[in-house]
Amino acid sequence: MIRAQNELSRALVYVTGMTCGVLAAIAAEILLRRTGVEIADTWRSLASGQSLQIRAVSVFWLMIGSAFVASAVVAAALSRLPPPWLRLRTLRWLASAVLVFALAEAGHIAATTAGHGGGAHTAMSMVALAAAALVALFGAYFATRG
């Protein structure tokens, strides 16, 4: 006889929170890129020996902050609300529709923005996303601790 599991595993909660945090960091980078703030400007500031400008470093902090908050919210919700979520079916459908439209808009914005290409942007994006993934894992851990 198979019993329904009433609790999600901690690893699943951490991975889901971390994934949502990284997606939030990507969305933050896309939205900042549209306003003209490039993550590659941080590399140029470091390479030229100039002092880092707040505008250049703010991309990192906003990406990391959004990853932390999103992962903490998702992990807290998954760890505190036991499945099955039958009572919240309408809310889940509404949240899913909002998420799909938000991701579609972020994809549309990313396709229309013209920015720096090449290795500097890719390298800085990968470093920022790795840092965002680590901070998202911390956010998920701290949200499920209590």
Image (tube, grey):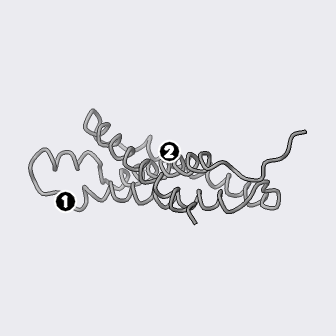
Closer to us: mark 2 or mark 1? Answer: 1
Toward the viewer: 46 or 77? 77
Q: Which residue is mark 2?
A: 108
What's the residue at 73%, 53% (across, down)?
7
**Residue 142: image location, x then y, percent:** 50, 61
- As helix, strand or loop, the secondary structure at mark 1 comes to loop
Residue extending farthest to the left is: 49
Decide: few, some or many residues near mark 2? Use Cα within 10 Å; few <14, some 14-19, many ≥20. Answer: few
Question: On residue 53, which mark appears?
Answer: 1
On-image quarter of the C terminus: bottom right
To which quarter of the image does residue 81 belong?
bottom right
- As helix, strand or loop, the secondary structure at mark 2 comes to helix
Toward the viewer: 84 or 5? 5
The correct choice, above or below, for 82 with respect to 14 in the image is: below
Decide: few, some or many residues near mark 1? Use Cα within 10 Å; few <14, some 14-19, many ≥20. Answer: few
Residue extending farthest to the top is: 118
What's the residue at 46%, 47% (across, down)?
109
Alpha carbon of mark 2 to alpha carbon of mark 1: how far?
A: 29 Å
Toward the viewer: 110 or 71? 71
To which quarter of the image does residue 127 belong?
top left
**Residue 36: image location, x then y, percent:** 31, 53
What's the residue at 17%, 57% (across, down)?
52
Disc 2 marks a residue whose amino acid type is: His
Disc 1 marks a residue whose amino acid type is: Gln
- Sequence-wise, the earlier of marks 2 and 1 is 1
